[in-house]
Amino acid sequence: MSNRSASGPRKRISDAELEQIAPPYRALLPLVVFAQAFNTFGRAFEKAVQPAGLNLSQSITLWALLLSDQPLTPTEISRVLPIQTHSVTTLLDRLQDRKLIRRRRSTSDRRSVNVTLTAEGEQLAKQFIPAVSAVIEEVFLGLSTDELETLESICRKIRNSSTRRLDANPDHLELTVEQLTGPVARLSAETKK
């Protein structure tokens, strides 16, 4: 049954109340579309890794560990996941139970834990990456170089503003971006030579 009457949708709040609480339309529209894009891309990504028995966060974690030149800490892993930071421990527990990752205390800082892939984790990550790459190519490579650069710039601005709103430093997030994209950037640069 619809909430709409013959004269149109039923108003839940007055225009004056709406004006007080609603964000500016020029920000609301891109926000809604951004949320839809993130959610639908996440579902497409998760569908690609479903045959491996992984969810989105698990597959991103394995992929990040495969791409990184060095072990990652749980904090570094949390910076690329669409989950709350406190949920990373549970995620890592599940991956460790499946023998896909290994956690070891850092030799230089006993408070820090380094996470690496096991041989099984590496094999599984390499198995699902072609399916994920196909999703990424289909979704993002339809964009021009200028559009991709604009998208990256806009996402950085949103990320940095949101991070500062949380009283955090976005520079740490940028270090994680460099850490995860560095090997691919190097390969791309070598290929162009």
Image (spheres, rainbow, N blue to C red):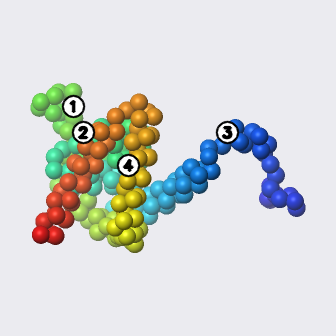
Answer with left or right where residue 23 lies relative to residue 129.
right
* Crowding at mark 3 (Cα within 10 Å: few <14, some 14-19, many 20+): few
Do callouts 2 and 1 mark residues in contact (Cβ within 8 Å)?
A: yes
Q: Position of residue 163 (x, y in %)?
A: 41, 38
Q: Position of residue 140 (x, y in %)?
A: 38, 67
Q: Please tell me whether mark 4 sits on a helix, a strand or a loop.
A: helix
- Mark 3 to mark 4: distance in Å? 26 Å
- Mark 2 to mark 4: distance in Å? 22 Å
Quadrant of the rendered structure where residue 175 is? top left
Q: Is residue 38 visible?
A: yes
Q: Earlier in the sequence, mark 2 or mark 4?
A: 2
**Identity, as a three-letter code, of the amino acid under mark 2:** Thr
What residue does disc 3 label? 21
What residue does disc 1 label? 112
Q: Position of residue 75 (x, y in %)?
A: 30, 37
Do callouts 3 and 4 mark residues in contact (Cβ within 8 Å)?
A: no
- Mark 3 to mark 2: distance in Å? 40 Å
What residue does disc 2 label? 73
- Please name which of the two marks, 2 or 4, marks the residue nearer to the observer: 4
- Mark 3 to mark 1: distance in Å? 43 Å
* Crowding at mark 2 (Cα within 10 Å: few <14, some 14-19, many 20+): some
Q: Position of residue 118 (x, y in %)?
A: 19, 51
Q: Please tell me whether mark 1 sits on a helix, a strand or a loop.
A: loop
Residue 156 numbered tag: 4
